[in-house]
Image (cartoon, rainbow, N blue to C red):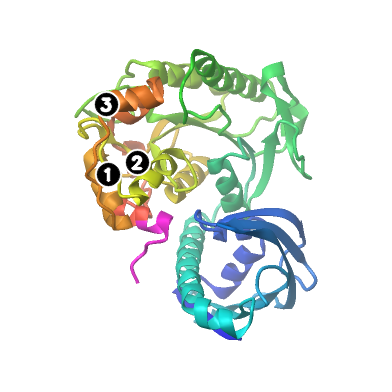
Amino acid sequence: MSVFEWRSVLPVPAEDVYAWHARRGAFERLVPPWQHLTVIERSGGTEDGAVLVFEYRGGPLRGRWVAVHQDNVVGRRFVDRQVHGPFAYWQHTHSFVPQGPRASILEDSIDYGLPLGGLADVLGGPASRRALERLFRFRHRRTQGDLLRHAATSGIPRLKVAVTGASGLVGRNLCGFLSTGGHTVARVVRGARIETGDIVWDPELGRLSAASLEGLDGVVHLAGESLVGRWSEARKRRIMASRREGTALLATTLAGMKRPPKVLVSASAVGFYGDRGDEPLTEESAGGEGFLAEVTREWEAALEPARQAGIRVVQLRFGVILTSAGGALGLMLPAFRAGAGGPMGDGRQWMSWVALDDVLGAVLTALTDERLSGPVNVVAPEPVTNREYAKTLGHVLRRPAVVPLPAAAVSQVFGDMGKEFLLAGQRVRPQALEEAGFSFDYPLLEDALRFELGKMRR
């Protein structure tokens, strides 16, 4: 039997830390992007007898993990024990120890036994401990970041928010982030795997019931065909239609309501500005040229009915969202991990990036800060060139990053997507967020990559 412990001092009361863990979505927020876990069943929260069932996969290992909660003391402690899973024994005690009225110690203590007994302890013990250290360093950093974000809006009543695109990478994280902050979240889904509280829509058939949207404080619109992948003409039509038609359906439905939500926050992209070289860009800059610029113009224009109806509309122009679970970083990682990564094209194109957790913070700010309206650039304050990005990623991974991918090869492999998404660039500044006093958790690229890849310094 082995024991692992990890402690952090948090500038948040113990009761708030416990409440965060007890709410729906906490487990998902604590799963790092390098782990592949999917919740398939849950009953309750942290109370005694509550059950969580999830599937895991990693290398040759895959299976089902069943955990039951016990020894719950509200505000102070709960325990989850593996009743079925990969370990011979696993009992995880979550403790929340007050340190005065405004701080606490978050302590995770795990008693565990590896399969195959003593032989596994000898052969796999050090590796298991390193994996646990990596995991809990990530978990505690994310827990603190989320708690501080929500503490900043603690004086505002909790919201009821609907989220389209809730099954996507950003949407899944946003639902968990908002829920653990005490907000009520309704997923807007197409009909597959409907859960209690979900709202059903069908953008292609123009179906969305205004009655299902009654009582909402805000809507976050993230749905749309993924931009990642080769763009055939058919794919371009789907990308355009998914944004224009879905957004128009949502905006017109909200505009026709007697009591519409106060705010509609819609995704957009810095592709609006086109390929602009070294030109500094803000929300006041004109749009550019190209397919992405055309898509974003149509996307944002489709929001007009909601704006005309008096709803506060915010268009979040996302930069490249950093997450190793997908997107551009997910595409690049295999080559960089193999030591075959490097700049694309001449490497001089600007990359306006943003950490996933800062995206979630920006969405919360857009929902709660009435000063924000219209386009808002969601990018880190320090854009980098593609060459700088490649060098930093290689440094974090401890791999060389000097193998360039010529522009011709990028175009051949990725087609128009490569030309506009990988070889084009925008040097974008988050002017509106900065003026609103937004604080980035990850203003620097290396720190963002280290967190996302589990390479944080001790």
Q: Which residue is mark 2?
A: 353
- Is residue 457 magenta-colored? yes
Q: Mark 1 or mark 2, which has the lower sequence index?
A: 2
User: Which secondary structure, mark 2?
Assistant: strand
Q: Amino acid at mark 1?
A: Tyr
Q: Is residue 238 above or below residue 109?
A: above
List x then y, in percent, for residue 95: 59, 78
Look at the image and tell me whether residue 157 can be seen.
no
Amino acid identity at mark 2? Trp
Q: Nearer the viewer, mark 3 or mark 1?
A: 3
- Left or right side of 123 for 50: right
Callout 3 crowding tier (Cα within 10 Å): few <14, some 14–19, many ≥20: some
Nearer the observer: mark 1 or 2; the answer is 1
Disc with the residue nearer the chain's start (3 vs 2): 2
User: Left or right of 265: which side holds 385?
Assistant: left
Region rendered in magenta:
450-458
Q: Which of the pair 272/91 is nearer the observer?
A: 91
Residue 433 within the segment the image draws in magenta: no
Tell whether label 2 touches label 1 (CB within 8 Å): yes
For marks 3 and 1, the one nearer the N-term is 1
Q: CA distance from mark 3 to mark 2?
A: 21 Å
In the figure, 73 relative to 444: above or below? below
Q: Secondary structure at mark 1?
A: helix
- Residue at the disc numbered 3: 407
**Crowd class of label 1 (few under 14; some 14 to 19; many from 20; radius 10 Å):** many
**Residue at 46% in and 51% down:** 357
Q: Which residue ends up furthest to the front in the rendered image?
A: 119
Amino acid on which disc 3 is placed:
Ala
